[in-house]
Amino acid sequence: MPGIFDTPVSRRNFLATSAALTGSLLLPKAGAFADDKSAEPARIALLSDTHIPATVENNGYRGFVPADNLQEVVKQVLESPAHAAILNGDAARLEGFRDDYVTLKKLLQPLAEKLPIHIGLGNHDDRGNFFKEFSQQPDSKELVQGKHVSLFSLGGTRFVVLDSLLYVNKVAGLLGKSQRDWLEKFLGDDDQSPVVFFVHHTLGDNDGDLLDVDRLFKLLAPHKKVKAIFVGHAHIYQFDKREHIHLINLPAIGYNFSDAQPIGWMSGAFTPQGAELTLHTIGGNKDKDGEVTKLDWA
Ligand SMILES: [Zn+2]
């Protein structure tokens, strides 16, 4: 499973700290929770659009300093009961420089010691540079050639992080045929446990959205097991629905584009029946801080 940043303390004891930074997968499988209705929900820290520059002192935007914001979010996630974290793209400031990822890794290190972090790619990431810092597991199989797709199961829910990075530092995104073909196969299997997707790009019909959004929904709509899609990109906090699928826009961590929007993250508690999502604001519009939204997987 490529691009997972995870340096559990138990394993760190046996490794030099620097050597432990290559990341690996140590995540309980669904079986640890599966089929037990009283089981603990899968608690996932939902992060997006960190926009971390190589040099943390500069590159503020609209008065926000993305590195400071991420540091605060890391602190909050560490105090939360999260089992895993997902960062839904635009991890790097603008152009996905290798040094952006060096800095990102330093900022995420305290969290990676506690839980696995699945990092998706956005239009301000560079796939090649990303993998220079967040190396692939030697034994991992690339699920979709040339794309960074990762998935895991927890508490009876399957979490799939897709890759919509088309061009670095240009707005539009695309899953592409090979990823859509993989998706079709993935959804065609017998496993009926709920699936939630993470894709960086927004799902509208503007030129800067996910360009193959209609082809994606054509694939997803027939499958009742597909419950939700989380996006980032717009730096807004928003809920919507298309067909039977819940759509959640995660707020940005780095900065907002408008004063009306919060800056922060969401925590999610997922069960096979639904999800409970809580907004945690650290800046911008804090009016909805602590807001809880319950989604039923009807
Ligand atoms: Zn962004």
Image (cartoon, rainbow, N blue to C red):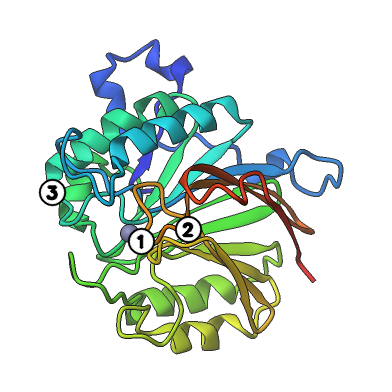
Quickly name the residue at label 3.
97
Give the amino acid type for the residue marked by disc 2 in the picture.
Gln
Q: Nearer the viewer, residue 7 or 50?
A: 50
Query: From mark 3 to mark 2, how far is it between C-alphas?
Result: 27 Å
Q: Which of 61 and 76 is in front in this view?
A: 61
Q: Nearer the viewer, residue 143 or 18?
A: 18
Residue 134, given in percent of the width and then of the height, sits at 26, 41
Quickly name the residue at label 1.
257
Give the mark toward the camera: 3 or 1: 1
Give the mark toward the camera: 3 or 2: 2
Give the amino acid type for the residue marked by disc 3 in the picture.
Phe
Q: In which quarter of the image is ligand 1?
A: bottom left
Where residue 7 sits, quadrant-wise, is top left
Residue 135, given in percent of the width and then of the height, sits at 25, 41
Q: Which residue is rendered at x = 86% and y = 41% of the image?
A: 38
Of callouts 3 and 1, the N-terminal one: 3
Residue 270, given in percent of the width and then of the height, sits at 69, 51
Q: Nearer the viewer, residue 205 or 17?
A: 205
Quickly name the residue at label 2.
261
Q: Vertically, is 57 above or below 229? A: above
Residue 189, given in percent of the width and then of the height, sits at 61, 72
Query: From mark 3 to mark 1, how far is it between C-alphas?
Result: 22 Å
